[in-house]
Amino acid sequence: MVFMGADTIENNAPLDEAALADIVEMKKVGSGGHLNIFAQVHGLGVPRRYHIGIDDGVEVPKDQQDPVGGRALAHFIESSLMKVKHRRKDHSMLVLWGHAYDFALGRAPTRRGSIDALDFAELRGVLLALQDKMLAWYGGRERPKIDLLGFDACDLASVEMACQLHPFVDYLLGSQIGIPIPGWPYDRVLDRLQKPKDRLMYPAEAGSYVVRRFCESYKALSPVSLTLLDLAQTDELRARAELLALTLASAIGEPYARERIAELFSRSQTAEGKPYVDVADLCLNLVRESGDALVIEAARALGDFLASPRPPLVGCSQTGQGRPFVIEHGRNAGETARLNGVSLYAPHVVPNHDFDAVRCLYQNFVFAQETRWSGLVHTLARLS
């Protein structure tokens, strides 16, 4: 299921041609057998919904077109699952496609003429309501999850997104940096799902496959990166990130230490102009140069969690058991060599970043509400 927000937004590249090109790529494969492909496109006139290879697209019913609060997304997911009589044992993948910035996705004009966005608190609400409905459809007690949620959008392979989605999603696919306008190679990815080698791929394998095909689709002149995260390990990630936030918050009370730590954050910036740091790279810099024993211990614990392989479990490649939190991380250029798969928000690494304008949206993240990270990075921003 690919939900596409193709509205042209001021100061951003237009997405209309890219959306149509991706639909063409999907049509090269088409639905059939064990694979169903759905897409819904907003921003090219009346929203249209496609069962790729089955129909040529139909207008979305008027009462399901409103994107505000994620309502259009919720209708799209539900209608797709119901149309194919989705069962608990069947697998599902949702891709959210479009511009993403300021902690929101899929911006679209509203009736008031302003710009509305699906922020990530609303996304969580959509997935919670969907989970309730799926539980009623399938029966039983275990709350069902979407197997894979991918972002064909920028800067969303983050700790914040992992914590936001893990009650509803098994695996997260996202990039730490920008996604070039051509986006994912849907024809190559879907063709392999339609024509598997020997057996069907399971979700963790399919996610790894997307990472590899995406990164090899671009030459180094267009740096890209994509990551597959195992959200089952999110609680441990949150706990280790919280410990690091606590030790850093204590350390920056001393002016000299604050300046040093702020500089180490800046060295770990994911890309120029982006208010994010690569978490593993930050941990390495803190271990080597922070000079604070407690910070070093906490940074080493978080860095080891992200970088260390787990004990191998023979025969478990289908389920992904035994893999680390960062299951697969791909990149295509030397410019991306310091990326390790997952990021954290740090507004002070971008000079003159208006962090107050988006702070309320950042606070919608569960991670920001449940840890000291927001307080830490906004303190660094105020003092920079």
Image: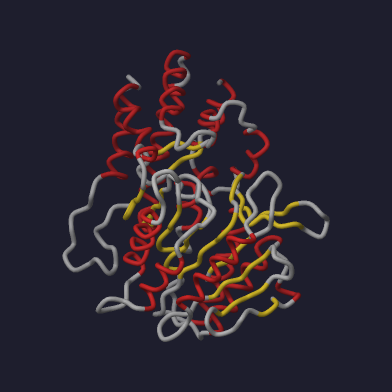
Taking the image as shown, residue 53 lies to the left or right of residue 215, namely right
Q: How is the image coloured?
A: secondary structure
Please, is residue 69 above or below residue 375 in the view? Answer: below
User: Residue 71 location in percent, x, y?
Assistant: 67, 67
Q: Residue at x 69, y 62 (%)?
A: 43
User: Residue 175 location in percent, x, y?
Assistant: 45, 50
User: Residue 85 location in percent, x, y?
Assistant: 51, 86
Q: Quadrant of residue 216?
A: bottom left
Q: Nearer the viewer, residue 286 or 211?
A: 211
Taking the image as shown, residue 306 lies to the left or right of residue 46, namely left
Quadrant of the frame with the C terminus: top right
Q: Nearer the viewer, residue 285 or 293?
A: 285
Residue reaching furthest to the top: 256
Please, is residue 219 above or below residue 358 in the view? Answer: below
The number of callouts visible is: 0
Q: Quadrant of residue 49?
A: bottom right
User: Residue 357 location in percent, x, y?
Assistant: 68, 36
Q: Residue at x 70, y 65 (%)?
A: 44
Q: Residue at x 43, y 32 (%)?
A: 246
Residue reaching furthest to the right: 112
